[in-house]
Image (cartoon, coloured by chain):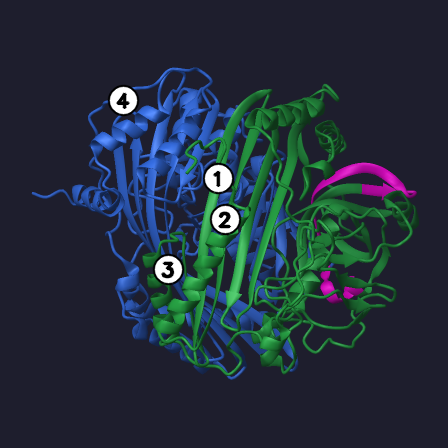
Chain colours: A blue, B green
């Protein structure tokens, strides 16, 4: 029986190593340049990625772009020190240069010699090794965007402008570690976004919706998903036309299912990344075993979900992804780790070692972060609130991991009056304190949903795709940044 | 060829820029052969080193070396673009072919095309952008160490650190198009930064500071950066939430540029022709408070945003965008200008050295003028809607009473509408932060809603 992952590994070798004539002996020679006395860990990260994007406005696809990026990152770790260099040329002299530069981090002399038996762990693939760019011909990509545009316009005469974009990429990676372990992956990623502007009596509003994941473009055509995105963008924009100014102050807030899980990403996710906790700079540092959330709150970071935007068949350091329980029934149980921070903290890596590209150093990063279901019917949760805010869609968020203060901005929200959904309100930023916001969770719904596949997380200048999710949730006290005092 | 990576080949000398120019020429020739009627290409290369030191020990040494080629091919009024990090002849050719193939699939628009030939820059003054710094990795480590040590020695309440860092980068960028325009710019950027953590009553606060310049001789001392980092961190200790209220708000100079940035976003061509802005048709109208002047100075010597030409080769020039509160012009490139029936303002790639004309008061003077209100020193989140002007962001800073700082505040939001905020500017400070592309002093707005406990 063929192992599909071995196929991935051999295809990655064919694409990344073969054209440059790099074989196992060359890997040994390169590794010998990086390793040696004083170096505890080293890896070589080979990457070849292709990306395209097509965008539509004024009814027509007027621009498109295609890009290719490739290179090799070389890292040497000595205690808490990391030396890092990279090259965008797949030729041995350039790679040897990069290896020497990275190696210089350890001041101890001596030439390394390196001979290991290179072997790849056979990890189950979480998605197919597709090439989205080749999955549709260019005419069909243009037609897909035109169809989405027409659908959005057909929804309502108040739609004055539609912008839509289609992006796809294929990322082929191979990481070779000093211990002989090789990890390889072929990662497809697609995304379709629709933004509409609506106008009524001189008032303009905008809203957008999109989705995607580790698929080919047919994902958007199947089940008419792309049309659903158009409907949702128009619906949200029309709601905003009716929106009244948002209230200001601390109040009960009900968050809807799915994308509002960005709360978890900002409020606790970043604070539980291993690097900040090793350094003691996170508001969550040293708090394992403490109650940081209400009973019933269980939050995980799960890189093993099939086809999700945040999933990885193997992380960027060759570690298998896993389902890491961060908070179990309210108790803080674990951090997310890459190889370096795990080693320095004396724990195992959790498959969260990620990097934007070969030109960036890996760090502990989230994958798909979500909260498990509770027992309440969402309608029951809304009915329980006398006066508050019901927030169902959000834009971006941000956190200061040291003070624990986090924000996320609602793009679709409603007042709750006497347990019923009342007037829509204009977008407002919500602010809270990470270490205690989940202790104010008083009801959790039974309607867990994951987001539609559009999340991108930024940390120290590096962007990676992520996912979030949650059931409907009631929080007793969150500060809403509206204008109405 | 020099194979010693600690002494890399220059990316800014004549040989390096000649190589980039040859890649631009090749891309333009290949575009013509592939059937493009016009074309433009941008080729750049950069390198540098950055080091981070934490608790006096080296944490990372990163060597950066990047290059990229971007080509846009026009077939009549259709366009396609492609980019690659591979400068080989084959890679350039296949990028050009990819761009032409895309151009054949995209829809035409008479507004699409190169900038008009008569607008191309013809003068290339020395703007003082390139100042290579002969600094070794050990020297950078020493600077980062001194920066952090200075911050850690200020007060025992500074209990932890994210470290000190120092970096030096330089690069060259060549832009050419089929009008025969070819421009070459080499530039450098060096800097130090520091971030430390203070602790009191079991809660932690972090802040940072940096110095950045084209020429290393213009940087602050490492000790000054460390001291400022410590002061900024210590003053936040004991922060608390305040009650919800409406009051005047002062944006401290380092973040005041953001307010002006939202204005630029709303008068950018792409926002205007899509009518995705609350400032559609604002030219000639009073959008800011009387007395406010905002101008662009693209030729400032050693300026972070300086360039003789924009991303389309169009000559840049100093101009007022706002005079006495009235909008004088938009921020346009060729495509958006044609969509609006206007001429490009030479802003392909953005504004270059935007200056908010300072007033007479320093920050203390502005706080005295305000009397009672909020001084904001940090903003987080993305709650700005350019279509409606609605504004709501997370903030921290200081409550001000009797014209002086009373106590630090956090976990609050500030909200309003940008149209009201621009009209409500009550003072602009002379405490200009000139480290970046937007130069502003502290700005006081007459009233915003502050949401807290």
Number of the front mark, 4 or 3: 3
Indicate the chain on which mark 1 is placed.
B
- In the rendered view, does A161 fall on the left or right side of B126? left
* Residue holding disc 1: B9
Q: Is residue B277 above or below residue A460?
A: below
Q: Is residue A327 above or below residue B32?
A: above
In the rendered image, residues at marks 2 and 4 fall on the same chain: no
What is the CA distance from the residue labelled 2 to the residue labelled 1? 9 Å
In the rendered image, residues at marks 2 and 1 fall on the same chain: yes
- In the rendered view, does B197 fall on the left or right side of A59? right
Residue shown at 30% from the left, 52% from the top: A307
* Residue holding disc 2: B16
* Residue holding disc 3: B92
Q: CB under 8 Å between callouts 4 and 1?
A: no
Per the rendered image, the range of residues in magenta is B399-422
Secondary structure category for the residue under label 4: loop
Secondary structure category for the residue under label 3: helix
Indicate the chain on which mark 4 is placed.
A
* Residue holding disc 4: A114
Q: CB under 8 Å between callouts 1 and 3?
A: no
Residue shown at 42% from the left, 48% from the top: A466
N-terminal of the two: label 1 or label 3? Answer: 1
What is the CA distance from the residue labelled 1 to the residue labelled 3? 22 Å
For residue A221, which quarter of the picture?
bottom left
């Amino acid at each position: 029986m063929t192992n599909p992952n071995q196929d991935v590994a051999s295809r990655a070798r064919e694409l990344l190593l073969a054209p440059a004539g790099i074989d196992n002996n060359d890997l040994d020679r390169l590794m010998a340049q990086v390793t040696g006395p004083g170096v505890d860990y080293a890896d070589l990260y080979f990457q070849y990625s292709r990306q395209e994007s097509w965008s539509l406005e004024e009814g027509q696809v007027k621009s498109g772009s295609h890009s290719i990026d490739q290179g090799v990152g070389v890292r040497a770790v000595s205690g808490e020190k990391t030396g890092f260099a990279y090259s965008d040329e797949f030729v041995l002299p350039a790679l040897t240069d990069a290896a020497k530069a990275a190696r210089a981090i350890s001041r101890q002399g001596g030439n390394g010699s390196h001979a290991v038996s290179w072997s790849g762990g056979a990890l189950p693939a979480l998605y197919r090794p597709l090439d989205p760019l080749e999955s549709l011909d260019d005419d069909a990509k243009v037609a897909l965007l035109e169809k989405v545009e027409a659908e959005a316009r057909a929804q309502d005469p108040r739609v004055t402008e539609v912008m839509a974009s289609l992006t796809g990429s294929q990322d082929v990676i191979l990481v070779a570690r000093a211990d002989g372990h090789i990890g390889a992956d072929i990662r497809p990623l697609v995304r379709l976004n629709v933004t509409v502007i609506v106008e009524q009596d001189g008032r303009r509003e905008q809203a957008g919706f999109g989705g995607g994941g580790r698929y080919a473009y047919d994902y958007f055509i199947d089940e008419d998903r792309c049309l659903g995105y158009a409907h949702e963008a128009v619906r949200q924009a029309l709601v905003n036309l009716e929106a009244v100014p948002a209230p200001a102050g601390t109040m009960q807030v009900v968050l809807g299912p799915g994308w509002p899980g960005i709360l978890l990403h900002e409020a606790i996710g970043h604070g539980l990344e291993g690097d900040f906790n090793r350094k003691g700079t996170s508001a969550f540092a040293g708090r394992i075993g403490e109650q940081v959330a209400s009973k019933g709150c269980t939050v995980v970071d799960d890189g093993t979900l099939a086809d999700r935007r945040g999933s990885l068949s193997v992380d960027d350091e060759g570690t298998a992804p896993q389902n890491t329980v961060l908070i179990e029934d309210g108790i803080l149980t674990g951090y997310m780790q890459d190889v370096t921070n795990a080693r320095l903290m004396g724990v195992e890596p959790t498959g969260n070692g990620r990097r934007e590209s070969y030109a960036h150093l890996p760090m502990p990063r989230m994958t798909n972060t979500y909260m498990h279901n509770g027992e309440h019917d969402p309608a029951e949760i809304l009915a329980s609130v006398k006066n508050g805010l019901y927030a169902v869609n959000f834009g971006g968020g941000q956190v200061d991991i040291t003070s624990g203060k986090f924000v996320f901005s609602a793009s679709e929200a409603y007042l709750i009056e006497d347990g019923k959904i009342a007037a829509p309100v204009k977008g407002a930023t919500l602010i809270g304190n990470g270490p205690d916001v989940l202790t104010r969770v008083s009801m959790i719904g039974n309607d867990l949903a994951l987001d539609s596949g559009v999340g991108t997380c930024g940390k120290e200048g590096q962007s990676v795709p992520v996912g979030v999710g949650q059931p409907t949730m009631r929080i007793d006290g969150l500060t809403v940044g509206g204008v109405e005092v | 060829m020099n194979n010693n990576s600690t002494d890399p080949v220059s990316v800014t000398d004549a040989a390096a820029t000649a190589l980039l120019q040859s890649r631009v020429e090749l891309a333009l020739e290949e575009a013509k052969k592939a059937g493009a009627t016009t074309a433009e290409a941008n080729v750049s290369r950069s390198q540098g080193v950055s080091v981070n030191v934490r608790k006096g020990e080296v944490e990372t040494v990163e060597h950066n070396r990047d290059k990229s080629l971007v080509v846009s091919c026009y077939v009549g009024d259709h366009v396609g673009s492609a980019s690659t990090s591979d400068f080989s002849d084959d890679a350039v050719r296949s990028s050009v072919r990819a761009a032409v193939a895309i151009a054949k699939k995209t829809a035409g628009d008479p507004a699409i095309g190169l900038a008009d030939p008569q607008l191309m820059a013809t003068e290339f003054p020395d703007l003082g952008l390139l100042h290579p710094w002969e600094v070794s990795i050990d020297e950078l480590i020493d600077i980062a160490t001194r920066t952090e040590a200075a911050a850690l020695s200020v007060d025992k309440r500074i209990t932890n650190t994210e470290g000190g860092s120092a970096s030096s980068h330089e690069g060259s960028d060549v832009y050419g198009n089929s009008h025969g325009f070819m421009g070459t710019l080499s530039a450098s950027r060096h800097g130090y930064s520091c971030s430390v953590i203070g602790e009191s009553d079991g809660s932690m606060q972090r802040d940072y500071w940096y110095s950045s310049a084209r020429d290393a001789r213009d940087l602050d001392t490492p000790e000054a950066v460390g001291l400022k980092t410590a002061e900024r961190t210590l003053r936040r200790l004991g922060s608390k939430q305040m009650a919800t209220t409406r009051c005047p708000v002062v944006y401290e100079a380092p973040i005041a540029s953001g307010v002006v940035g939202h204005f630029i976003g709303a008068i950018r061509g792409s926002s205007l022709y899509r009518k995705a802005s609350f400032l559609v048709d604002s030219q000639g109208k009073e959008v800011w408070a009387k007395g406010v002047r905002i101008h662009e100075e693209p030729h400032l010597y050693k300026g972070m945003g300086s360039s003789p030409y924009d991303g389309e080769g169009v000559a840049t020039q100093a101009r007022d965008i706002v005079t006495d509160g009235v909008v004088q012009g938009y921020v346009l490139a060729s495509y958006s200008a044609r969509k609006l029936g206007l001429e490009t303002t030479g802003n392909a790639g953005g504004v270059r050295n935007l200056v908010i004309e300072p007033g007479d008061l320093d920050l203390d003077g502005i706080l005295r003028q305000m009397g009672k209100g909020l001084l904001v020193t940090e903003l987080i989140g993305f709650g700005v809607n350019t279509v409606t002007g609605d504004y709501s962001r997370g903030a921290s800073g200081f409550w001000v009473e009797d014209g002086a700082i009373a106590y630090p505040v956090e976990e609050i939001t500030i909200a309003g509408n940008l149209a009201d905020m621009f009209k409500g500017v009550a003072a602009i400070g002379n405490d200009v932060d000139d480290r970046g592309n937007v130069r502003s002093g502290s700005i006081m707005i007459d009233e915003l809603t502050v949401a807290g406990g």
